[in-house]
Image: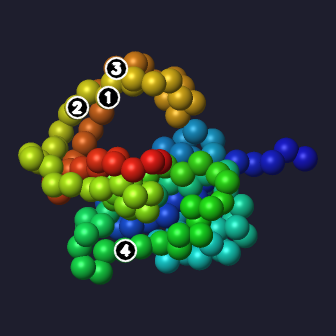
Amino acid sequence: MQLKEKILIIDFGSQFTQLITRRVREANVYSEIHSHKISVNEVLKFNPSGIILSGGPMSVYDQDAPDFDAGILKIKIPILGICYGLQILTEKFGGKVEPAKDREYGRALLNVIKSSPLFNGISQTSQVWMSHKRLHNKITGRV
């Protein structure tokens, strides 16, 4: 019996969460969106191949910023943080999220500087879309 890959998408309120889910499904991978309040036990029951932490409208430093069960980080599967998801991963691993000098909105160039299975099938330089207005991540600790 062949195991089916499954991706769990943990939602922090991004307007793009549905789009992320659709793209994962277009890659013929089953995915489900769950609230950031999901427990590590619920994640283990879902048994995902990987997790995507979505973006959201807040900063990790905002009062009442959403959090998630840190036990999820101990599961031995890949985790991808997008926008807020990367902010919270940065903070959880001892990094720092700092104010950006300018707003970032619109087309940008993605330059792949280190090969990774994440970038398989993607040109070394690709045009992408970005929308950030608050903070950027600065990894200052060991990740």
Residue type marked 1: Leu
Q: Quadrant of residue 51?
A: bottom right
Q: Residue at x 39, y 23 (%)?
A: 113
For the residues labelled 2 and 1, say whether their Cβ atoms are less than 8 Å apart: yes
Q: Callout 4 environment at 10 Å: few (<14), some (14 to 19), or many (20+)?
A: some
Residue 30 percent across, percent down from the top left: 64, 52
Residue at (48, 44) in percent of width and height = 23
Q: Which mark is residue 110?
A: 1
Q: Which residue is mark 4?
A: 66
Residue at horizontal 40 percent and vertical 58 percent from the top: 94
Return the residue nearer the eye: 85 or 74: 74
Q: Which one is in front, 96 or 57?
A: 96
Q: Disc 1 to disc 4, how far (Cα)?
A: 28 Å
Query: On the image, which quarter does residue 46 sit in?
Result: bottom right
Q: Tell me the CA gap for discs 2 and 4.
A: 28 Å
The residue shown at (25%, 69%) is 61
Residue 87 x, y percent position in the rendering? 34, 57
Amino acid type, residue under disc 3 in the picture:
Thr
Give the Cα distance between marks 3 and 4: 33 Å
The residue sitting at the right extreme is 1
On residue 108, the disc is 2
Label 1 Cα neighbours within 10 Å, binned few <14 / some 14-19 / many ≥20: some
